[in-house]
Image (cartoon, rainbow, N blue to C red):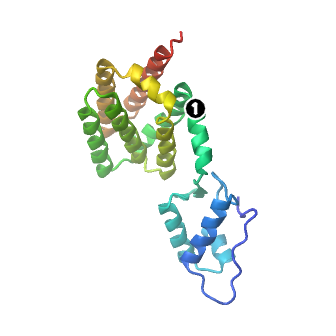
Amino acid sequence: MNQLHSFDPATVNGFTVSSANIVVELRQAILRGDLVFGQKLPPERLLALQFGASRNTVREALRQLEENDLVSRRVGSGTYVIYRDTNDRDDAADATSPLELIEVRFAVEPNMTRLAVQNAGARDLERLEEALINLEKAGDDPKRFSRADEAFHLCLAECSRNPLMAWLYKQVNEVRGNTLWFEAREKILTPARIAEYNREHRQLYEAIRRREMDNALSLINDHLNDARTDLIGANGES
């Protein structure tokens, strides 16, 4: 998609357009809904022409928008809108059951793990280990464990080095905060299950650290299968 539909940048009348001007224009277009979630922005070259600005100025504007979680820039792919109206996110979180969430995690986390094995740097692995240690320190408290578990999996997403993947997992964690998930968590997270999940997390971390692709993918799938089985048991389903 090379054009901004339903959006025209401000007319330039002989003055130099700054990155701040571009940020304001694009931010307003995103918040109005002229630019929607998932939409790809035109390349920097075309944006520069539309705004009458240099490509460096456009690049700086996009960097600021990314820092504000409005867009995500992907090397070799382009810039995408990642802002979604809060009410839409809340409605989706409230309407999603724990089992539906697991289905999404199956769609996301194996690929997230694959990218982490490929891309995680030394500092990424240090942060992942720190998140793992915090998880293991959470003890038998379901609430503390759940928060630490969310942080560990988000850190795993960040190890992918794909900002859109990390943003997507933040949405997964939002759903994990809803009432249905809270009720399921209270049934599932016994001391024995917490200990087993921690063992799985430790094995997954070690596989990623050693760049063992097949092992890491097998472990994340086993982990998600265990989580799904536990949820089905908590719901009393066969």
Residue 100 x, y percent position in the rendering: 56, 28
Which quadrant would residue 114 be assigned to in this image?
top left
Which quadrant would residue 186 be assigned to in this image?
top left
Circle 1 packing at 10 Å, graded few (<14), some (14-19), many (20+), is some
Residue at far top of view: 238
Q: Which of 28 and 118 is in front in this view?
A: 28
Q: In the displayed structure, does residue 150 sit left or right of residue 235?
A: left
Which quadrant would residue 95 be assigned to in this image?
top right
Q: Indicate the secondary structure of the residue bearing disc 1.
A: loop
Q: Residue at x 63, y 66 (%)?
A: 28
The N terminus - image quarter: bottom right
Q: Which of 191 and 210 is in front in this view?
A: 191
Asked whether residue 43 is in view, the answer is no
Q: What's under tag 1, amino acid-wise?
A: Thr
Q: In the displayed structure, does residue 87 sit left or right of residue 137?
A: right
Residue 45 x, y percent position in the rendering: 63, 72
Residue at far bottom of view: 14
Residue 120 x, y percent position in the rendering: 36, 47
Asked whether residue 188 is in view, the answer is yes
Which residue has dot 1 on it?
96
Q: Nearer the viewer, residue 50 or 12?
A: 12
Q: Which residue is drawn at 50% across and 61% down?
A: 68
Residue 89 x, y percent position in the rendering: 58, 44
In the depicted structure, whether residue 220 falls above or below residue 170: above
In the depicted structure, whether residue 236 falls above or below residue 204: above
Please state the total of marks drawn on the protein image: 1
In the depicted structure, whether residue 59 falls above or below residue 233: below
Q: In the displayed structure, does residue 218 sit left or right of residue 69?
A: left
Q: Nearer the viewer, residue 206 or 179?
A: 179
In the depicted structure, whether residue 15 falls above or below residue 2: below
